[in-house]
Image: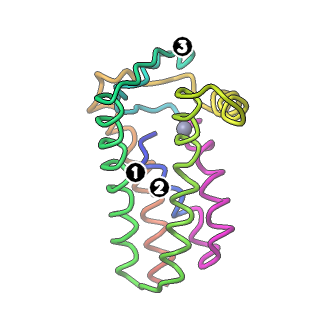
Amino acid sequence: MTLATHIVVAGAVASPFLPNPLVGFLAGFLSHYVVDAIPHWDWPLKSIRINLQGRKYKTNFSSGTIIFDTMMMLSDMALGFLALFLVLQVNFSINAAVALFAAAVGGVLPDGMEFFYHAFRKEPFVTHHRFHSWAHTRRIIPHRETLKGIFMQLPVVAIPLGFLMFIFFR
Ligand SMILES: [Zn+2]
């Protein structure tokens, strides 16, 4: 899933435990694998190409691909943080903000670890990669089917966002 989706879901899963940042982080972290099990689309990375089954990888780590992917990842995460920030407007507290931030970090950390796996192929990223691949759906929507991919991801964002709003409006 996109990082924005992971961030929103992580925030929703952590919201019943607010404002506990540690439980928030753990809930966000675990939610990553559950969300990745849903058939989905991702925007294509330039440095790591993954085939349809998600089983074979081709890497191309140059300064150009790394800069491009980093910019894309930051924009993707910014979208997710923007969604959490909008929810926080409802009923802002610094403790809730910290806990949601911790959840968001937990929610994107597994994909960060995947990036390090492809770059270095060292432990603990190798073991994590095995688990991440095991939990990950085999049904990956091709990159070119962007509209279908985004459309399919909408409910995965909207339902958690609605839940977060519910928690914050209470
Ligand atoms: Zn993932």
**Left or right: residue 46 compared with residue 31:** left
Residue count near mark 2 (Cα–Cα under 10 Å), binned few <14, some 14–19, many ≥20:
many
The residue where tag 2 is placed is 7
Q: Type of residue at label 1?
A: Ala
Instruction: Tell me which numbered mark, 3 or 1, is placed earlier along the sequence.
Output: 1
The x and y percentages for residue 43 are 34, 32
Q: Is residue 35 in the magenta section? A: yes
Which residue is at 32% across, 38% downward? Answer: 150
The x and y percentages for residue 166 are 47, 74
Q: Secondary structure at mark 3?
A: loop
Q: CA distance from mark 2 to mark 3?
A: 26 Å
Q: Type of residue at label 3?
A: Lys
The residue where tag 3 is placed is 56
The x and y percentages for residue 154 are 36, 46
Ligand 1 shown in quarter = top right
| Beta carbon of the mark 3 residue lies under 8 A of ligand 1 | no
Q: Type of residue at label 2?
A: Ile
The x and y percentages for residue 60 are 40, 19
| Beta carbon of the mark 2 residue lies under 8 A of ligand 1 | no
Q: Give the quarter of the image for residue 127.
A: top right
